[in-house]
Image (cartoon, rainbow, N blue to C red):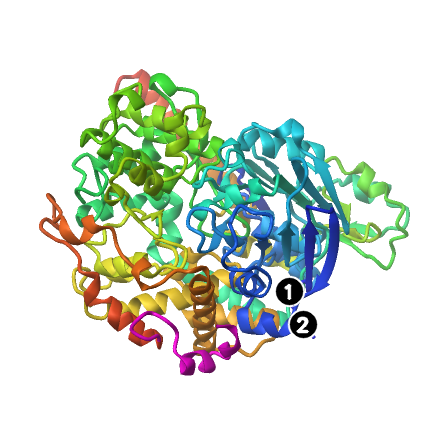
Amino acid sequence: MLKGGYVGKILRVNLTNGNVMTEDINEKWAEMYIGGRGYGTRVMLEEVDAKVDPLSPDNKVIIATGPLGSTYAPSSGRVMVITKGALNGAIACSNSGGHFAPELKRAGYDMIIIEGKAPNPVYLWIYKGAVQIRDASKLIGENVKKTDAFLKKNTHPEAGTLEIGPAAEKLSLISNITFDGHRAAGRTGVGAVLASKNLKGIAVKGNLGIAVADNEAFAKAVYSARSFLSKDPFSGNGAAVLGTSMLVNIINGLGALPSFNASDAYFENADNISGERLAAENLVRNEGCDSCPIACGRVTEIRKGKYKGEHGVGPEYEPIWALGSMCGVDDLDSVVMASYLCDDYGLDSISAGATVACAMDLYEAGYIPKDDVSFELKFGSPDALVEAVRLMGEQNTPFGKLLAQGSYRLAEHYGHPEFSMSVKKQEFPAYDARAIKGIGLGYATSNRGACHVRGYTIPTEIFNRKVDRLAYEGKAELTKTMQDLTAALDSTGICLFTTFGLKAKDIAAMFEAATGFKCDADEFVKKGERIWNIEKIFNLKAGFNMFDDALPERLEKEPIKTGPSKGEVTDLSRMLPEYYKIRGWDENGIPKQDKLQELSIEDLI
Amino acid sequence: MKLLTINIDKCTGCRACEYACSFVHTGVFNPLDSRIRISEFLDDFVFIPSVCTQCEDAYCISVCPTYALSKNTQTGVVEFDSDKCVGCKQCIISCPWGSIRLNHTGKELIKCDMCGGDPECVKVCHAKALEYEEVEDMVMDKKHRNAIRYKELIAQQQGV
């Protein structure tokens, strides 16, 4: 019997025939895989052939919550989208904050499994035990914000929504799913998967309560966690004042901010696009996801120049980097505008920015014929940046269509795939692997392609005095630990940012009190390791192998040109074999039998 | 006397207060059972908490036919005795703020009781949009802030 945390029900919607079913949660899986990302991946392994075309009706999309969602556990509003990703065909779990997850839980479901393909564009409306599949043909071509407004207007003003934008409708491989019009499950092209099913959005409103197994223990664990978070300099105050973009100056100060498509890792004018500058020139107020004491969200506006009067949310640190230093652009208002455009079209702003940077690099190298682009696509040009993002979002020109497929397809099209700063076709984020070695191992081994939030080694590598960011030693261990912990905490439905103040034991205590499943820190991390391994198994079945665990050539061959990390390259071979060994995988990166048995997943490979 | 005060500018819309309130009163997390509610305006990202103001001359008390609502003169809280309530809903109709409402069942009345002098919502509000403070302190604080503004204006005029 589930004692708390979970609702205990799964909603299954088959869009091909319109069938809607409710199923019970598999309690054994809940205990083994926690929920959200872990449980969803287990469902994918069970129900979806890993070799399936991500954009075919045979792929499924799971919109999942975790057992800590819809409670006052800190930052517990996370929603997870699990599917076979459109960008690279790997297992994708793309997460978002906002208030959708708690609404879904209170509507009576821990997750929704979406199958098949609707004959016409539709959206779902879930309320008081009823599920309606409604016509969405009027919404085609509508941007994210307007779609959110339409859904709320036509269902319930306080409904939680998810929606895709015009980029996804035209099957951009770097399109996202947005929640409540302003928070995104950005990476791996999950938007295109939803679009391939003709599903434009979902609205949900809940009215049920969520109980936990042990009220007293839960209150104690939550208040303790909240107090740790308020004491940490980042989660306590820094994120509220400067947002994630406080990192721009910090990371650039280490010479670790990839610039000019990572041909350098130091951006001279970084201060012009810093969190401090954003706070001074654009910030209107903070906004927090469900139950979040950190409230890193930025509500912003543009107050001068040609985009004066535009307003929206963000940009966060990653888009500022991708659309800023990665493209060599130091005009903050243009970066903010480009970020707004990504949000309107429903584009992953990390991949979008890195793709524009790749295009600028190809253009300057002379590999993109001048006839293909109608303007000067040069590094540092704010106008070229905004125009390129527009082309990418509209996709009404051949070049725009190419951009919308991400940097790998773009660079491959022009015969130089090495210009794409990606792993498994997904663009890496805002930390240079030459200047912070461990994160490079994380990029190479991340199950969904290059990514910082699968194993965020950055705080340890740059703030812990005992750890040398330039050393290779110990990074395999650190990467594995962070990957396993993150897989577990993602699955509970809380935000990765809580790790600034919380340890595994703190999260395990909340999980145990909420669900009644016995769980200490070791057991919690073990569940994370199990989740990591089943993701790996899905990828192996999909056809990925050790050669896909590799970094872009540039990071291993071209030394950083300027700044504090000048001269650095990275050497993955000094970390990867050790990483495989620590994981209990063989030299080809395949989990060994005894590891699988230890994790009780030997029947899955 | 202490008051539950709301600073709208600081609210981030996280709704932890709603969770805390419902959990401490019912043992279950359900915003529909929370005595404090947030209205959100996503277009402008403005979030406005609202909760019972514990009126001195409360409409709800004067319309209640069964004396289920009463003013505690010591704590200042407008108290609700569910045993006396017959569910006529006159208090809901008369409250200008919407601070008395029905819970998720649509039958039982709920209103803020200040958690007996230690409001749970304040404890989870890291943004400090909600505070529990002495009326006098709050008045002094406001007076002082306004005085500073006048002082600055005068200094400006004098060209200092």
Question: In the image, A491: left or right of A341?
Answer: right
- Closer to the camera, B46 or B126? B46
Q: Which residues are magenta?
A: A585-605
The residue depicted at 54 percent of the width and 69 percent of the height is: A33
Marks 2 and 1 close (CB-CB < 8 Å)? yes
Residue bearing mark 1: A6
**Vertically, is B145 above or below A462?**
above
Position of residue B18 measured from the top left corner of the image (x, y, whole percent) = 63, 51
Position of residue A383 measured from the top left corner of the image (x, y, whole percent) = 30, 22
Residue A518 shown in magenta: no
Whole-angstrom CA distance, mark 2 to mark 1, is 7 Å
The residue depicted at 40 percent of the width and 38 percent of the height is: A405
Numbered tag placed on residue A604 in the rendering: none
Circle 2 sits in a helix, a strand or a loop, which is it? loop
- Closer to the camera, A161 or A554? A554
Residue bearing mark 2: A2
State which chain disc 2 sits on: A
Q: Amino acid at mark 2?
A: Leu
State which chain disc 1 sits on: A
Question: In the image, B120: left or right of A223?
Answer: right
- Closer to the camera, B1 or A13? A13
Placement of the N terminus of chain A among the 4 image quadrants: bottom right
Position of residue A335 measured from the top left corner of the image (x, y, whole percent) = 33, 31
Circle 1 sits in a helix, a strand or a loop, which is it? loop
Q: Amino acid at mark 1?
A: Tyr
Judge the density around disc 1: few (<14), some (14-19), many (≥20) Cα neighbours within 10 Å. Answer: many
The verdict on a common chain for dots 2 and 1 is yes
Position of residue A23 measured from the top left corner of the image (x, y, whole percent) = 72, 62
Q: Quadrant of residue A500?
A: bottom left
Judge the density around disc 2: few (<14), some (14-19), many (≥20) Cα neighbours within 10 Å. Answer: some
The residue depicted at 35 percent of the width and 63 percent of the height is: A545
Q: Is residue A533 visible?
A: yes
